[in-house]
Every structure is written in C-alpha cells, then in structure tokens.
Amino acid sequence: MENVSPALVEAGKLHTEEDPASMIIPGSAQLPKSYHFCGVTIFAYTHPRIQVAMLGMVIFLTVGMYHVLSALGGAGQVTAYLADMASIALYTVFAFFALIAPPCLNYFGIRYTLCFGGIGYAVYAASLWCFNHTGNESFVIFAGAWNGLSAAFLWTAERTGITAYATEDNKGLYVAIFYTVYQIGTMVGSAIPIGQN
C-alpha cells in the first residue's frame, strides 16, 4: 500500500465534483431582455453595459467636475495657495485611505461605497463656493481632506464595478465605455475655462 498523507486524502474529498468555474461556457450567461425599436437595440437598465455607462456618469459628475475646478487654476480663486493646501490634504488622506477602502468595499458593497465616494467631491465644490462668500479657509482644507477620503472609496468601487460587470471577453469594451463617458465629462468641463478666457 502506498503511503498517502492525511492532508492529501482530505483534499481528495473536497474535489469530488468538477469545479463549477470550469463548467461555465463563454457567452452562456443570461443577460436582461433587450428591446428593439426602429432597428436600435435598447438595453435594459440592469444590463451590464448600462450599469458601466451609469458608473461612468457617476465619475463624469464627480471627478469630471473636480477636474473643471482644477483647470480653472487655483480652483477659480485669486491665488492658488488655498487650492494647493486643499490638494495636499486631499492626496495625503487619499494615500492612507486607499489601503482601507478595499475591505470596506467588501463589507458594504459597490453601491454604498460608490455613494459615499461621491460625497467628497460635492463637499469640495461647496467649500470653494462657501469660501467665496465667507472667506472660511479651514473649511476648504477640511473639504480637501474629506475629498481624499471619499476619493479612495470612489475609485476602489469604480474599478471593482468595471471588472465585476464585464465578462472576460468584454472587459476591454466595458473599460472603453467607462472611460469614454468619464473623459466626456472632463472634455465638457474643460470647455468652461476656455469659454471664460
């Protein structure tokens, strides 16, 4: 009789059936029903392509508009000092919380993590508006730090969403859809400073 370790015997019991991942046939996933109107295919709201496009719209409206404020030079203020201080706070906090965001994403899921991630960009834009009326510099720096916190969660959820919605053979298409929508936000936003000059 052959000398077999107990660990090998137990491992053999675990793998008695074929691995479920190897039984998946590419292209066999059931996608939501699409609608056809005048020769145009309209995907359902729950279709992965629509979900990735909506994910791109979230980034379009948050990060794209943040890029507008950055393109204004000093976030539209007279000097760039305050925007620079807020950026220092943003990227310092971002670097730290980028390590904490993935476990939080696993616990809370993409939807809540993405929602939390978008709040910081709105707070940052509101702080600049508030500064123009009240001169409260500390709120702008706090908003920069809050933006860094939320940006870590936003970008973690965004990357997870793109890879989770796409099948292996469509990942390139889904990344292209996302970045097209995202860069349109930056392009539209960059037209504002050009129009001001």
Image (tube, rainbow, N blue to C red):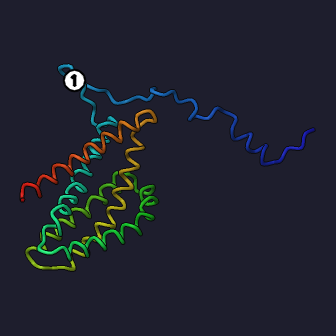
Residue at image x 83%, y 47%? Answer: 5
Q: Nearer the viewer, residue 186 or 178?
A: 186
Three-letter amino acid code at the position of disc 1 = Val
Seen in the picture, residue 70 relative to 42 is either above or below; the reply is below
- Identify the residue under disc 1: 40
Seen in the picture, residue 15 relative to 68 is either above or below; the reply is above
Residue at image x 56%, y 35%? Answer: 21
Which of the 4 quarters of the picture holds residue 64? bottom left
Q: Nearer the viewer, residue 175 or 62?
A: 175
Residue at image x 32%, y 42%? Answer: 52
Is 173 left, or right, of 99 in this rendering? left
Residue 86, image x and y in percent?
Answer: 25, 73
Residue 26, image x and y in percent?
Answer: 48, 28
* Numbered label tally: 1
Instruction: Determine whether the residue tagged by mark 1 lies in a helix, strand or loop.
Output: strand
Residue at image x 10%, y 78%? Answer: 134
